[in-house]
Amino acid sequence: MKSYILGVVIGLLLVVAAVFTFKKMTSIPPAKQANAAIEMTRKALDFEKSGDMKAAVKMYKKIVKKCPSSGWAELSLYRVFEIHASEDKKKMIETADWYLKEFPRKRGSEIATRVGEYYFLESGSPERARKLFLHAVNLATDPQWTIRARDRLADFYYRQGEFDKLIEMNNHVIESLGDKVNADHYRILNLKAYWRQGAQKKAYDEAKKIKNNQQPVVKNEILYWKVLSKFEPKNAEALIYLGDAYRRMGFQEQAKTYWRAAAKIAPKNAEIRKRLKSK
């Protein structure tokens, strides 16, 4: 029994030694990796120009494996991700897993968000998408992609009916990022969530916090004007824009109903008269 165990141990040691020797023979010394990576990148780009994407991917992967200490390794793996993103979603996901393991602090938020969007919008896997969006937010490697991941999370919570989580997240974004984000965008999401919950007064309170109601994200939101006109029946502006919103949807007669109501409040308003004359 002892001789058997000894034989197994010796065998494992020989395998480890063989792997180590192979890696030593095939690896490139750190000091030479940058130059080697540059040369291999040129070859990969030539393959891309010729349309041989398979060879290009193989070369980029070679850079990642043989030149891990060079800055080209991350760029090469990112390029592999980009190629697969347009050609093979399964390989894109595999590459994303590899990237997030090796270089999460580089473009982790972008990679996680993009794959999350695939799961959320194309493959119908919302739970996987949610995990990736959360991962992107936690990594916070790029403000643009971190905000985009939060927006996708908001969509996820809204579609799933998890309104409390949506509101909690939006309030956290507004409080923590302040002027770095468009707070009105998140206020509109909160307003819609409260309305869906049946909390109309809270929806109105959220509407009152909006600073710029003429920006598209607010102006084009029919529910915003509906909430204002419900709690402020003498607000002619709200009725005008509510009518505008219905007109954009193709409901001209319903639009005129709101414009007529606005005209009763502000009979001298030329903009209202102009709208009522429109066909």
Image (cartoon, rainbow, N blue to C red):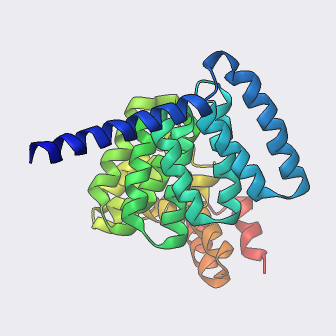
Q: In which quarter of the view is residue 246 placed?
A: bottom right
Q: Is residue 278 above or below residue 239?
A: below
Q: Position of residue 39 (x, y in %)?
A: 81, 31
The number of discs equals: 0
- Residue 209 can be seen in this image: no
Q: Nearer the viewer, residue 205 or 195?
A: 195
Q: Is residue 187 left or right of residue 35?
A: left
Residue furthest to the right in view is 50
Q: Position of residue 228 (x, y in %)?
A: 45, 58
Q: Is residue 163 above or below residue 14?
A: below
Q: Name the residue: 83% across, 58% down.
A: 52
- Residue 279 can be seen in this image: yes
Q: Nearer the viewer, residue 124 or 25?
A: 25
Q: In which quarter of the view is residue 212 placed?
A: top right
Q: Name the residue: 55% across, 28% down.
A: 24
Q: Is residue 49 left or right of residue 150?
A: right
Residue furthest to the front in view is 3
Q: Name the residue: 51% across, 39% down.
A: 108
Q: Position of residue 99 (x, y in %)?
A: 53, 43
Q: Name the residue: 73% across, 45% down.
A: 59
Q: Tell me the quarter of the image containing the C terminus.
A: bottom right
Q: Nearer the viewer, residue 187 or 162?
A: 162
Residue furthest to the top in view is 31
Q: Position of residue 149 (x, y in %)?
A: 49, 48
Q: Nearer the viewer, residue 164 or 255?
A: 164
